[in-house]
Image (cartoon, grey):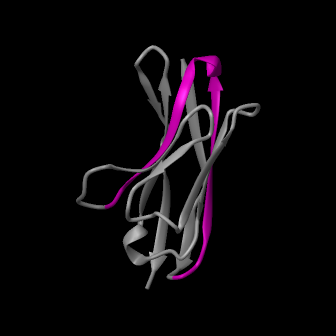
Amino acid sequence: QVHMVESGGGISQAGGSLSLSCAASGSIFSINAMGWYRQAPGKQRELVASINRDGTTNYADSVKGRFTASRDNTKMMAYLHMNSLKAEDTAVYYCKADLWSGRSSWGQGTQVTVSS
């Protein structure tokens, strides 16, 4: 079993920056890809960025050039650095681990609020 815990987030003005961290614990050897998702009020949860085990990343078009996702396999941590924040980035951000078994594990989420 894998347990994910996000930290960071908070409130920023538009144009500002925030960083999120995600710590994995438990059967971390079973983790393949990791990812960041977000869910705004009244909207479906969407992928923000995915990070493969080799560190390669994929981003949603809406955050390309502004957000940077990374991971540290020695610490089994994932990170999301968010720059040039916009009001539409306001959401609850979730960390997700995709396991080799095909199952997934989600964190509890952390709120990011961007004021315009």
Q: Is residue 45 above or below residue 40?
A: above
Q: Is residue 36 above or below residue 76?
A: below
The front one of 42 and 17 is 17
Q: Is residue 3 above or below residue 49?
A: above
Q: Provide residue 102's location: percent of width, then percent of height.
A: 40, 18
Query: Residue 77 lies in what quarter of the image?
Result: top right
Q: Provide residue 88's location: percent of width, then percent of height.
A: 37, 72
Q: Residue reaching furthest right? A: 74
> Is 61 displayed left or right of 73 in the figure?
left
Is residue 22 magenta-colored? yes
Q: Residue at x 29, y 61 (%)?
A: 41
Q: Is residue 95 above or below residue 80?
A: above
Magenta-colored segment: predominant secondary structure: strand
Is residue 114 magenta-colored? no
> Is 74 displayed left or right of 54 in the figure?
right
- Quarter of the image with the N terminus is top right
Q: Residue reaching furthest left? A: 42
Q: How many numbered marks does the figure carry?
A: 0
Q: Provide residue 35's location: percent of width, then percent of height.
A: 49, 42
Q: Residue at x 47, y 63 (%)?
A: 64
Q: Residue at x 40, y 77 (%)?
A: 87
Q: Which residues are magenta?
A: 15-40
- Quarter of the image with the C terminus is bottom left
Q: Provide residue 32's location: percent of width, then percent of height.
A: 54, 25
